């Protein structure tokens, strides 16, 4: 049985090299756009908080990257996310398509501003 990661670095390193690169870039995108965010592992995936409130999460899978920005982050960007498979508060970015890093950055910035207002 695979041991659960206790740090984001361990989590990323548990994936094949090509997926590691994508996850590391997502991590960098988040930390650049939310420099004060606290990074941890929550629900078995990388998690970020600002002002003690959830900001975003992400997770690697065999065929996609799951990105979780709570329902408000997804509602605000519904038009841009419409082409992706979604659930409540989640979106799947397929690994066989270009990763929308700019969109991820915009969502993170929106969530940072939202957490600052609360």
Image (cartoon, grey):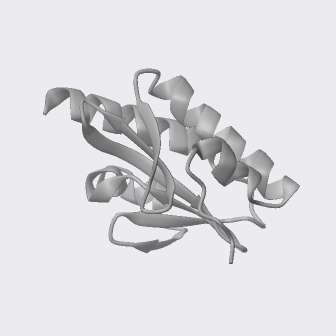
As displayed, is residue 30 above or below residue 16? Answer: above
> In the displayed image of the protein, which residue is found farthest to the right?
17
Rendered image quadrant of residue 32: top right
How many numbered marks, from 0 up?
A: 0
Query: Where residue 24 sits in the image (x, y, percent)?
Result: 70, 42
**Residue nearest the viewer, comparing 39 with 102:** 39
Q: Residue at x 36, y 56 (%)?
A: 74
Q: Residue 116, how many percent across, how many down?
A: 22, 27
Q: Is residue 2 left or right of residue 104?
A: right
Q: Position of residue 82 (x, y in %)?
A: 47, 66
Q: Hey, which residue is sitting farthest bottom in the picture?
A: 1
**Image location (x, y in percent) of residue 4:** 59, 63
Up/down of 107 relative to 35, above or below: below
Q: Residue at x 25, y 40 (%)?
A: 53
Quadrant location of residue 34?
A: top left
Q: Quadrant of the C terminus?
A: top left
Is residue 63 placed above or below 76 in the rendered structure? Answer: below
39 displayed left or right of 88? right
Q: Nearer the viewer, residue 38 or 65?
A: 38
User: Could you tell whether 22 is left or right of 44 in the image?
Assistant: right
Residue at the extreme top of the image, as rendered: 35
Residue for point 68% across, 78% down: 1
Name the residue located 75 percent from the left edge and 51 percent from the top edge: 13
């Amino acid at each position: 049985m695979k041991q659960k990661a206790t740090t984001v670095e361990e989590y990323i390193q548990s994936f094949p090299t090509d997926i590691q690169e994508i996850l590391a870039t997502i991590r960098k995108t988040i930390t650049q756009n939310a420099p004060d965010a606290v990074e941890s592992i929550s629900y078995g995936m990388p998690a970020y908080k600002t002002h003690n409130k959830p900001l975003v999460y992400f997770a690697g899978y065999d065929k996609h990257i799951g990105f979780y920005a709570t329902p408000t982050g997804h509602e605000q960007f519904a038009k841009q996310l419409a082409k992706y498979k979604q659930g409540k508060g989640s979106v799947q970015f397929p690994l066989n398509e270009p990763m929308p890093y700019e969109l991820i950055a915009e969502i993170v910035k929106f969530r940072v501003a939202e957490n600052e207002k609360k």
